[in-house]
C-alpha cells in the first residue's frame, strides 16, 4: 500500500458557544490514497462540514483543532500560514455547497477564473483567458468565451456549480473536497455534476472527498464511505462492502430513509425517530443509543470504539451490530 | 441590449440630472474661457440691476455679475463638494474595510476613533480648524472631508462584515488568496457599489455643508464667490432683491438633487446582485 495522500489522525474540533463547548468533530481518523474517493455521509450538523474545514484549515477563528491532519507528509494544522496558503489551490481545492454564494457576485466568471490562473500558475492574461475557456468547456459549459464575460447571476445554479468546479480544478489540485456539491441543485442536474466530478477526477488522478447527506450519492461514486454521527465516524468501510452489509444501525436507518420507487404511494417513510444529541452535552454512551431500536443499558453507559472485530475490513462503532 | 436596458431603467429624470451636472461641471471647468464678466469687478451704478443683455442674471448688491459669480462659485462649491467626500471615502473606506475584515483590536480602535470623531461637535471642529489653519478652500475641504470619514467608515465596515462571512470569501481563501487579494479583489468590488452611492450622497451633503459654513462666514474667504457665501450676502437685501439669495439657492438645490438622482440610479443600475433585478 502506498503512503496515504491524506491521513487524519484523532482530529477533534471544538467551538465555544454561549451554551458551552461544542464538540463538532470528535476524534475522527480517516485515510485517503492518491486518486481515491472517500464519501463522508451524515445528517445536518453531524460535523461533516467542520471536518472538511478542518482539513482545509478554514475553521472559524475561535474553533480549536486537536489531532493531526497529515497531507502529503506535512501536518496542515501546524504548517506556517504562508506555506498553507501556497498549498491551497495547487494541492488542495474545494467546491462548496451553494454555487449562489461561492462565486463573487460582482466579478465576471472570466475574472474569477483568469485571476486564479494568473496568481497560481503565473500565466499571462491571454494564456489564462484561453485556459479559462478550455476549463469551462471541460466542465461542460457551452460557448465558454461568451460565458467568461457574464456575471454569476446570469447563469443557472447548475452552470454556476460547473464554474465553481472549473475554478477549483484550475490549478490541478491533488485533493478536491466537494462539500455537498449537489445539495443546492435541481435533482436533474445533480447526476450531471456528480458525473462531471467523477470524470475529472479520473482524468486528473485526483483524490476526492465527497461530502453529502445522501447515501445514494456515494453509492456508485466512491471507493470508501465514512458515516458520521454526532461528530464521530460510526462506520467506515469500502463502499461495496458497506452496501453489501451494513453493521451500524444508524447506517441502516439512513438507507431505509431513502424513498424507493417501488413502494406504493402514501407509504410512510421510515424516518429516524428523535433528534441528534445536543453536541454541547456529550452522552456517556453511544450517541445514537437514544434513537436506536437495538440499544440496551450497555449502549447508554459506554461508548463503542470504532473497530473491526471481525477483521473484514469494515470498521463500525456498535455493541450490537446489524 | 445594453442600450434598451439602460433606457428602461434610467428614464428622463436621470438624463436631466446628468445633463445638469455636466452643464454645471463644464461651466465651472471652462469658466476662464467663457465670455463672462469678472466675478469680482464691481459696478456701483448697476447695484442689484435686473437682468439685461449685458448681465443675463443681473448684478448683486455690489454690482458684480451674478451669472459670472454663480459659475465661479460652482468652481469652488463643486471642487469642495467632490474633494471632501473623496477624502472621506478613501480614508473611511480603507479603515472600514480593514476593521470589518480583520476584526479584533484593529476594529475596536477604529470604531472607538470614529465614535470620538462623531461625538465632537462638527461646527466647533470646523471653527477651531479654520481659525488655527486659516480660512482657505483647502482647509475647508480638509475639515469637511475629515468630518465625513466616520460615515464612510461605518458603511464600509458594515458591508465588509457581512461580506467576510460569505462563502465566496471562504472559497477565495480555499484557493490560497492572500488577505490583500481578498480585500482588493473579492471585497472591494462589492463594497464599491454602496460606497459610490454613498459618495454621491456625500457630494450633495457637502455642497450644502459648504454653503452653510460659507453662510456663517467660516467658508471661502471673500471676495471669492461660492454658492453659500452668495446666499449669505444676498440675505442682506432679501427685501429689495430676493433673487440675489434665491438664484444661488436654486442652483444649489438643483445640483444637490441631481447628484442624489444620479447616485440612486447608478446604484440601481450597476448592482448585478440578484436582489436588485
Image (cartoon, coloured by chain):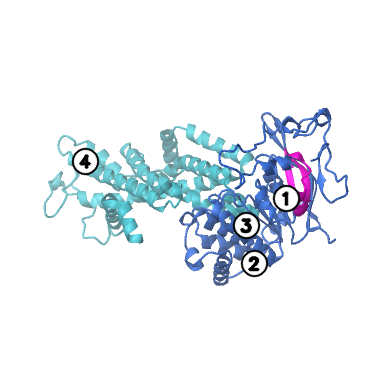
Chain colours: A blue, B cyan
Which residue has dot 3 on it? A194
Report the front residue among B45 and B274.
B274
Q: Is residue B201 magenta?
A: no
Residue at mark 3 shares a chain with residue at mark 4:
no
Question: In the drawing, does residue A254 fall left or right of residue A305?
Answer: left
Of the numbered discs 1 and 2, the one sitting upstream in the chain is 1
Cα–Cα gap, marks 3 and 4: 70 Å
Which residue has dot 1 on it? A55
Residue at mark 3 shares a chain with residue at mark 1:
yes
Residue at mark 1 shares a chain with residue at mark 2:
yes
Question: From the viewer's perspective, is the residue at label 4 or at label 2 nearer?
Answer: 2
Instruction: Please state the horizontal and vertical placement of residue B103, each as a whole percent of the image.
Output: 61, 41
Asked if marks 3 and 1 touch (Cβ < 8 Å), the reply is: no
Of the numbered discs 3 and 1, the one sitting upstream in the chain is 1
Q: What chain does mark 3 sit on? A: A
Instruction: Please state the horizontal and vertical placement of residue A260, each as a whole percent of the image.
Output: 62, 46
Q: What stretch of residues is rendered in magenta?
A: A226-249
Question: In the drawing, does residue A42 fall left or right of residue A135?
Answer: right
Question: In the drawing, does residue B167 fall left or right of residue A93?
Answer: left
Report the front residue among B47 and B145.
B145
Cα–Cα gap, marks 1 and 2: 23 Å
Which residue has dot 4 on it? B246
SS for callout 1: helix
Does residue B179 show up? no
Please give the label number shown on residue A121.
2
Amino acid at each position: 500500500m502506498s503512503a496515504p495522500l491524506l491521513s487524519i489522525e484523532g482530529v477533534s474540533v471544538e467551538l465555544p458557544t454561549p451554551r458551552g463547548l461544542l464538540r463538532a468533530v470528535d476524534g475522527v481518523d480517516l485515510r485517503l490514497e492518491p486518486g481515491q474517493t472517500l464519501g463522508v455521509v451524515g445528517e445536518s450538523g453531524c460535523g461533516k462540514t467542520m471536518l472538511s474545514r478542518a482539513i482545509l484549515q478554514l475553521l472559524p477563528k475561535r474553533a480549536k483543532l486537536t489531532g493531526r491532519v497529515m497531507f502529503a507528509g506535512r501536518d496542515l494544522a501546524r504548517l506556517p500560514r504562508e506555506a498553507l496558503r501556497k498549498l491551497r489551490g495547487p494541492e488542495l481545492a474545494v467546491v462548496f455547497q451553494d454555487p449562489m454564494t461561492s462565486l463573487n457576485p460582482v466579478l465576471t466568471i472570466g475574472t474569477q477564473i483568469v485571476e486564479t490562473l494568473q496568481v497560481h500558475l503565473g500565466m499571462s492574461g491571454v494564456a489564462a483567458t484561453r485556459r479559462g475557456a478550455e476549463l469551462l468547456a471541460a466542465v461542460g459549459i457551452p460557448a465558454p468565451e461568451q460565458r467568461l464575460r457574464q456575471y454569476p447571476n446570469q447563469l443557472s445554479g447548475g452552470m454556476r456549480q460547473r464554474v465553481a468546479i472549473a475554478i477549483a480544478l484550475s490549478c490541478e489540485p491533488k485533493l478536491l473536497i466537494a462539500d455537498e456539491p449537489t445539495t443546492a441543485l435541481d435533482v436533474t442536474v445533480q447526476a450531471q455534476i456528480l458525473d462531471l466530478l467523477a470524470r475529472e477526477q479520473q482524468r486528473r488522478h485526483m483524490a476526492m472527498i465527497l461530502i453529502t447527506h445522501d447515501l445514494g450519492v456515494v453509492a456508485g461514486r466512491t471507493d470508501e464511505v465514512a458515516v458520521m454521527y454526532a461528530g464521530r465516524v460510526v462506520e467506515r468501510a469500502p463502499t461495496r462492502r458497506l452496501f453489501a452489509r451494513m453493521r451500524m444501525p444508524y447506517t441502516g436507518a439512513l438507507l431505509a430513509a431513502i424513498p424507493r420507487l417501488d413502494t406504493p404511494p402514501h407509504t410512510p417513510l421510515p424516518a429516524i425517530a428523535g433528534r441528534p444529541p445536543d453536541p454541547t452535552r456529550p452522552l456517556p454512551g453511544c450517541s445514537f443509543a437514544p434513537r436506536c431500536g437495538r440499544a440496551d443499558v450497555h449502549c447508554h453507559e459506554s461508548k463503542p470504539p470504532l473497530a473491526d472485530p471481525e477483521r473484514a475490513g469494515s470498521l463500525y462503532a456498535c455493541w450490537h451490530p446489524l | 441590449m445594453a442600450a434598451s436596458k439602460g433606457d428602461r431603467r434610467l428614464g428622463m429624470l436621470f438624463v436631466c440630472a446628468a445633463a445638469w451636472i455636466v452643464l454645471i461641471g463644464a461651466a465651472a471647468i471652462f469658466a476662464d474661457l467663457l465670455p463672462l464678466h469678472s466675478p469680482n469687478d464691481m459696478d456701483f451704478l448697476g447695484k442689484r440691476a435686473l437682468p439685461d443683455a449685458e448681465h443675463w442674471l443681473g448684478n448683486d448688491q455690489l454690482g458684480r455679475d451674478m451669472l459670472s459669480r454663480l459659475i465661479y462659485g460652482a468652481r469652488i462649491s463643486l471642487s469642495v463638494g467632490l474633494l471632501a467626500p473623496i477624502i472621506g471615502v478613501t480614508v473611511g473606506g480603507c479603515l472600514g474595510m480593514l476593521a470589518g475584515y480583520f476584526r479584533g483590536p484593529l476594529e475596536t480602535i477604529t470604531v472607538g476613533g470614529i465614535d470620538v470623531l462623531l461625538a465632537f461637535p462638527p461646527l466647533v471642529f470646523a471653527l477651531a480648524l479654520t481659525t488655527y489653519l486659516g480660512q482657505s478652500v483647502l482647509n475647508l475641504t480638509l475639515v469637511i472631508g475629515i468630518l465625513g470619514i466616520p460615515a464612510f467608515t461605518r458603511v464600509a465596515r458594515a458591508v465588509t462584515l457581512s461580506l467576510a462571512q460569505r462563502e465566496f470569501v471562504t472559497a477565495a481563501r480555499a484557493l490560497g488568496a492572500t488577505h490583500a487579494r481578498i480585500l482588493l479583489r473579492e471585497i472591494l468590488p462589492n463594497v464599491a457599489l454602496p460606497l459610490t452611492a454613498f459618495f454621491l450622497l456625500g457630494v450633495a451633503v457637502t455642497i450644502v455643508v459648504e454653503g452653510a459654513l460659507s453662510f456663517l462666514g467660516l467658508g471661502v474667504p471673500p471676495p471669492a464667490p461660492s454658492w453659500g457665501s452668495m446666499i449669505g450676502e444676498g440675505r442682506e437685501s432679501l427685501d429689495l432683491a430676493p433673487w440675489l439669495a434665491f438664484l444661488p439657492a436654486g442652483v444649489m438645490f438643483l445640483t444637490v438633487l441631481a447628484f442624489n438622482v444620479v447616485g440612486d440610479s447608478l446604484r440601481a443600475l450597476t448592482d448585478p446582485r440578484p436582489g436588485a433585478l
